């Protein structure tokens, strides 16, 4: 049955939900508070990463986080502040940092990533979309034996799950990328990964949706809902209301406060990250994560992107100069021939990753309402997992068999 579906949030997750819902013949409207041209879905590293099988909540993360908290240019930072939501999120995060959670999540994360990567390839075959997608893999580049060993443990698990990954020495890396020397000891190459240029894909998907009847309302901040019993009747922004048969919440890092209007508690914190786009030629051809500094490097269409840091400091978009400079410093250390220009630093942008406490996204219904679906909390994997999330949400709304078991992604799951 054709339904009127209102989606709150027009990032990669919201657009992907819209795509699969309109394909099923539903009448879809997207409401977004922004102009839909910036934020996490635009500044990300563009990786599609079946390789990222280990969730953010893993053993050792609490100790690492505490150590890095006292270094203002460290790649991971929690701003200490009096905030009950942060406190609740932190407790759930700590409970999730267990071996049991990691083992349970490996296959789940791999499968949803693979589904999503296949869907990106389906998008790539659509005549209406002509975006940048390359299957070169991602290097995990290391300088030290400690980093090699740390990643080696992930590689063992990845290989057990059947992912294509191999160890390269420095000379082998340089053969793949002769124009940009790397100051490293070696790298693991996850051949299973791919990369994209997010801005191009977002622009094209938005246009595709508009051309196919989806209505998009920018600068429209949702602040309330009209509901009766277990049914949401409409979504409100100021004095305007959109009637809906189904509501999808894809509001990223803002979700916790938005859901208060529906009396739902969902733990999502904002994890700010930055990107630098260098438009001068760098010679970099291989996507690479610079392991010791946690910086991601992506050869995008027309520029090279350096991105990184995870700053848990609430909803704010301040550009912290020292963090931006730390990304540039790491780039220069790993690529001695690469010049990051002053204007590149000055034009740095940031985006907020929606962090769930256990590193798995929230995809599913909430028992409080019959016509509400949640699609958020994708943390560091939201770009990779957008399309799979859209497909799963469309299946849920259409009551079709699910491509994947949704239990691990339940918004009402237990932590630990
Ligand atoms: C530096 C960086 C690098 C990253 N690299 C990668 C990567 O390589 N691979 C990967 O898979 N992931 C990566 N990520 C993570 C990924 O970008 C995010 O997980 C993903 O973009 C989240 O998408 P989203 O649609 O859930 O949220 P968003 O893109 O934040 O979209 C949410 C939207 O909801 C809107 N909204 C919120 N509240 C309201 C409201 N009340 N009313 C109306 N609209 C509202 C917002 O305006 C926003 O447009 C990276 C993130 C960063 C910051």
Image: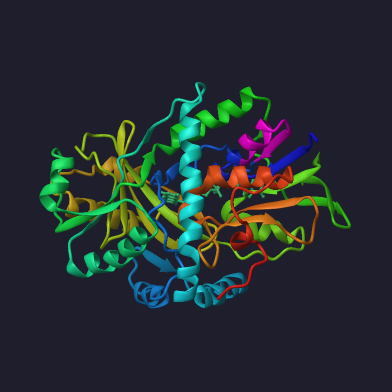
Residue 415 appears in view: yes
User: For the point 42% across and 54% down, which residue is it?
Assistant: 273
Residue 40 appears in view: no
Q: Position of residue 373 (x, y in %)?
A: 70, 51
Image height of 31 relative to 225, above or below? above
Q: Is residue 301 magenta?
A: no
User: For the point 36% across and 74% down, which residue is it?
Assistant: 64
Give 66 or 3, whichever is nearer the viewer: 3
Quadrant assignment for the C terminus? bottom right
Which stretch is magenta?
17-31
Q: Is residue 18 magenta?
A: yes
Looking at the image, the residue that sits furthest to the right is 228
Q: Position of residue 298 (x, y in %)?
A: 31, 43
Q: Position of residue 210 (x, y in %)?
A: 63, 26
Looking at the image, the residue that sits furthest to the left is 171
Give 287 or 36, whichever is nearer the viewer: 287
Q: Position of residue 155 (x, y in %)?
A: 31, 61
User: For the point 58% across and 73% down, which residue is it?
Assistant: 415
Residue 171 in the figure: left or right of residue 314: left
Figure label count: 0
User: For the point 49% across and 26% down, which residue is it?
Assistant: 129
């Amino acid at each position: 049955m054709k339904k009127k579906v209102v989606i709150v949030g027009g990032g990669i997750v919201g657009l992907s939900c819209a795509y699969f819902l309109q394909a099923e013949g539903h009448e879809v409207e997207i409401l977004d508070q922004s102009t839909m041209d910036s934020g996490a879905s635009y500044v990300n590293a563009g990786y599609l990463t079946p390789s990222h099988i280990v969730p953010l909540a893993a053993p050792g993360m609490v100790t690492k986080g505490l150590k890095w908290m006292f270094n203002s240019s460290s790649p991971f930072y929690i701003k200490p502040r009096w905030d009950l939501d942060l406190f609740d999120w932190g407790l759930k995060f700590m409970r999730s940092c267990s071996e049991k959670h990691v083992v349970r999540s490996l296959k789940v994360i791999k499968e949803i990533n693979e589904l999503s990567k296949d869907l990106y390839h389906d998008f790539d075959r659509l005549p209406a979309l002509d975006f940048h997608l390359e299957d070169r893999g991602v290097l995990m580049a290391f300088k030290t034996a400690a980093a090699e060993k740390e990643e080696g443990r992930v590689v063992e698990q990845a290989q057990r799950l059947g992912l294509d990954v191999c160890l390269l020495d420095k000379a082998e890396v340089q053969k793949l990328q002769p124009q940009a020397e790397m100051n490293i000891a070696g790298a693991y190459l996850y051949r299973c990964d791919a990369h994209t240029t997010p801005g191009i894909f977002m622009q094209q998907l938005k246009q595709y949706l508009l051309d196919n009847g989806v209505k998009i309302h920018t600068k429209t901040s949702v602040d309330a809902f009209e509901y009766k019993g277990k049914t949401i009747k409409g979504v409100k922004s100021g004095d305007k209301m959109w009637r809906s048969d189904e509501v999808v919440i894809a509001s990223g890092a803002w979700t916790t406060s938005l859901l208060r209007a529906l009396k739902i508690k969902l733990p999502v914190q904002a994890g700010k990250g930055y990107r630098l786009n260098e438009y001068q030629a760098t010679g970099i051809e291989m996507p690479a994560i610079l392991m010791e500094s946690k910086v991601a490097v992506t050869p995008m269409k027309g520029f090279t992107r350096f991105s990184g840091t995870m700053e848990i400091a609430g909803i704010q978009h301040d550009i912290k100069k020292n963090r931006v400079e730390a990304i540039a410093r790491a780039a220069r250390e790993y690529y001695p021939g690469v010049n990051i220009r002053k204007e590149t630093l000055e034009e740095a942008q940031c985006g907020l990753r929606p962090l769930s406490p256990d590193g798995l996204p929230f995809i599913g219904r909430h028992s409080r309402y019959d016509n509400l679906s949640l699609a958020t909390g994708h943390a560091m994997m939201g770009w990779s997992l957008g399309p799979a999330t859209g497909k799963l949400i469309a299946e849920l709304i259409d009551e079709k068999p699910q491509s994947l078991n949704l239990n691990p992604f339940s918004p009402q799951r237990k932590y630990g």
